[in-house]
Image (tube, grey):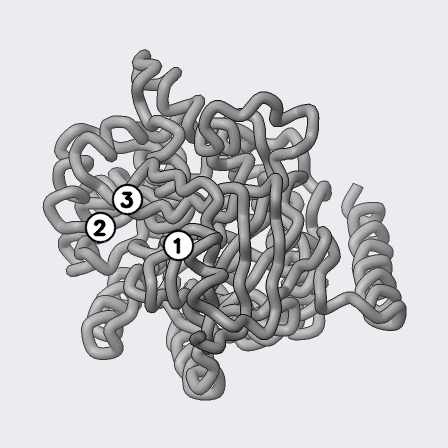
Amino acid sequence: MQSIDTLIEARWVIPVEPRGAVLADHAVAIAGGRVDAVLPISAARARYAPREVVQLPSHAVTPGLVNAHTHAAMTLLRGVGDDLPLMRWLSERIWPLEKSLVDAQFVHDGSLLAGIEQLRGGVTTCSDMYFYPDAAARALREAGMRVVVGLIAIEFPTGYASDAEDYLRKGLAARDALRADSLVSFTLAPHAPYTVSDATLRRIATYAEELDLPVHMHVHETADEVREGMQQHGVRPLARLDRLGLVTERLIAVHAVHLDAAEIALLAERGASVAHCPTSNLKLASGFAPVAALLAAGVNVAFGTDGAASNDRLDVMQELRLAALLAKGVANDATALPAAHALECATLGGARALGLDARIGSLLPGKAADLAAFDLGAWETQPCFDPVPLLVYAGGRAQVTDVWVQGQRVVQAQQPCCLVEDSQRTRVASAVAGWQERAQQLLRAMA
Ligand SMILES: [Zn+2]
């Protein structure tokens, strides 16, 4: 008998690779934080001597979901600027509030809340872009998540940094401080074409090559962005990024709503990824990303929630369902983005975009044991012909019961393991209430 840490015995295991596979009455064997094997429960019982057995008789176990784009700390701004278009939302609400509120403690407290919310929703990895990325990373790790830290660059000064050079210097210092943690990785995160100069983008292209990092950037989010980019630079933003050497397999183009056929072909040819954020695009009326066309061209598509201020849920299951439905509606084709492919985008697609597909995104032996268990035993998810489309169309984050990151249980019976003590819950709740009070005072003064 082989001794292992944990044996998870499930009604179904959905490994994501190969696409659409459903393994009934299978177990996931976990040793040293990794998947040792996925095999029939009877075979697992004969082969392993686990320290812990977890029985999930009405559950589907999937790879942990990957949130390919968020601004975690913005959970504290959830609900401060609803029902406004992007530029008014930014200039009248988000930027003034950020200017007054955002410091390392704000980012820590908001990111911790975001980590708790995401883990409860089966999200085990998030790719973050925000100020004080070191504080965000520490809080997301405190919650128990795997984190991809965006080293943000933007031209305008904030409390965090004075100019683009200062942002990059602080980001690289944060990378040095955090890189010993195997659950932390990094992207370069220039905010958007309209907030970052050519000179800064050129430097970022060089760093991306030298440091072997993805480049995580809002691109072609709105029609106005594309139009104003044309006026200012004479070319569309994606063409400008290409001229600056940024349209490569490292690029994670966030949103990518407004793309023409040549731009879709360019992203495919270069092996770039798109982080599709359907709820944010709908809430800010940015438009409909051409997801079916991107997939048909061979572009890797991942899903992101964007920040809570434009969503308002850090709920990848919701993005998954919405993406599958919108892809069909936009393409006028009910066969576009089938459920199994959508689940792949929400797991392996995110891992590929972030350069982590050798480590996470599917349940292959040797990959990290980042898992989510969904209880499909409730009335809402009856009957079950195939758990994959059932999860995508009828399921949601409310079905998530247990979550593991690198073999460690981080959610048990829907309770985050970082909040088992009363004192921990009280501390998080009072921090959130304190920030809400300060934001409300500012909003009253702005009215
Ligand atoms: Zn965003």
Label 3 packing within 10 angstroms: few (<14), some (14-19), many (20+): few
Label 1 packing within 10 angstroms: few (<14), some (14-19), many (20+): some
Q: Amino acid at mark 1?
A: Leu
Image location of residue 346, percent across then percent down = 42, 44
User: For this rendering, which residue is in front, 411 or 126?
Assistant: 411
Residue bearing the label numbered 1: 39
Figure disc tally: 3
- Which numbered circle lies on residue 1? none
Image location of residue 214, percent across then percent down = 29, 64
User: For this rendering, which residue is in front, 17 or 128?
Assistant: 17
Position of residue 207 relative to residue 338, above or below, is below
Residue bearing the label numbered 3: 18
Q: Quadrant of the N terminus?
A: bottom left
Q: Residue furthest left?
A: 269
| Residue 84 makes an appearance in the image | yes
- Which numbered circle lies on residue 272? 2
Image location of residue 108, percent across then percent down = 66, 70
SS state under label 2:
loop
Q: Amino acid at mark 2?
A: Ala
Q: CA distance from mark 2 to mark 1?
A: 34 Å
User: For this rendering, which residue is in front, 162 or 180?
Assistant: 180
